[in-house]
Amino acid sequence: MMKKLFPLITILLFSVGLKAQTNSNKQFPISETCQSVMKELTDLHQRTVKLFNEKNYDEAFPLSKKMSEIAEASCMEAKDKRLMLAINVADIQIKRGKKIEAQKIYDKNLALAAEVHGENNINFNNYLDFLIKLSIDEVSNEKFEQYALKSIEVKVNVFGNQSYEVAKELLRMAIFYRRDVPINFSRKSSSLKIY
């Protein structure tokens, strides 16, 4: 899924001059400062896509990071584009085997994702899901709980409190908290152990 974002950048960021939005309800203005760095971003984007498609992630990483830094400095109003570029950096970090670094990028941009998508939105729910999957083995119980509880809140608002999605999220939390505790079901004649 994340790999598909690279071709989308060409369409969203450059071909239409930063006018398309990830959420049609949000209209983020583009400053003159941001427009002035479009040539540099376009060049970096083309080089990054080429390296990414060649699976040369180590060389693609500094270029994608530079794009994100330029957007952070010059395109503060273009929140959806900044979010997209940050996710691309995280994607390359995952490809490089650096899941903790990718998780930190998602965590850093959590508030931005909520602002871009709106908190009661399927896109924000998907963002949280990806953050939880990256975090499940890498963060403390307290941090995982923060993400999971927020995900349950969003899922209740998006799908309803009796939905399969909410039940699945509650089960994921239960499994996470029981992961170090063996469950033992036994009868007189036989036993079934789940570890």
Image: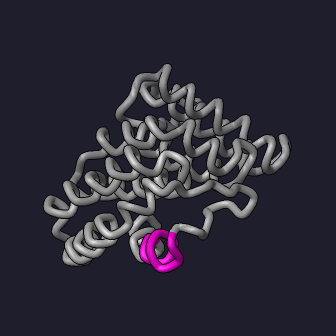
What is the tally of numbered marks visible in this picture?
0
Q: Which quadrant of the figure has residue 47?
A: bottom left
On the image, the x and y values in percent for residue 164 come to: 76, 51
Nearer-the-camera pick, 129 or 60: 60
On the image, the x and y values in percent for residue 17 come to: 50, 72
Which residue shows up at 54% across the image and 35% down it? 175
User: Which image quadrant: the C terminus?
Assistant: top left
Q: Which residues are magenta?
A: 9-17
Nearer-the-camera pick, 191 or 108: 108
Residue 101 can be seen, yes or no: yes
Quick check: is 93 in the magenta stretch? no
On the image, the x and y values in percent for residue 78 come to: 53, 53
Q: Which quadrant of the figure has residue 187?
A: top right
**Of all residues shown, which one is farthest toward the top?**
142
Quick check: is 15 in the magenta stretch? yes
Which residue shows up at 25% across the image and 46% down it? 98
Q: Main secondary structure of the magenta part?
A: helix
In this picture, residue 36 sits left or right of residue 118: left
On the image, the x and y values in percent for residue 118 come to: 70, 46
Which residue shows up at 35% across the image and 33% down it? 138
In this picture, residue 134 sits left or right of residue 130: left
Nearer-the-camera pick, 144 or 121: 121
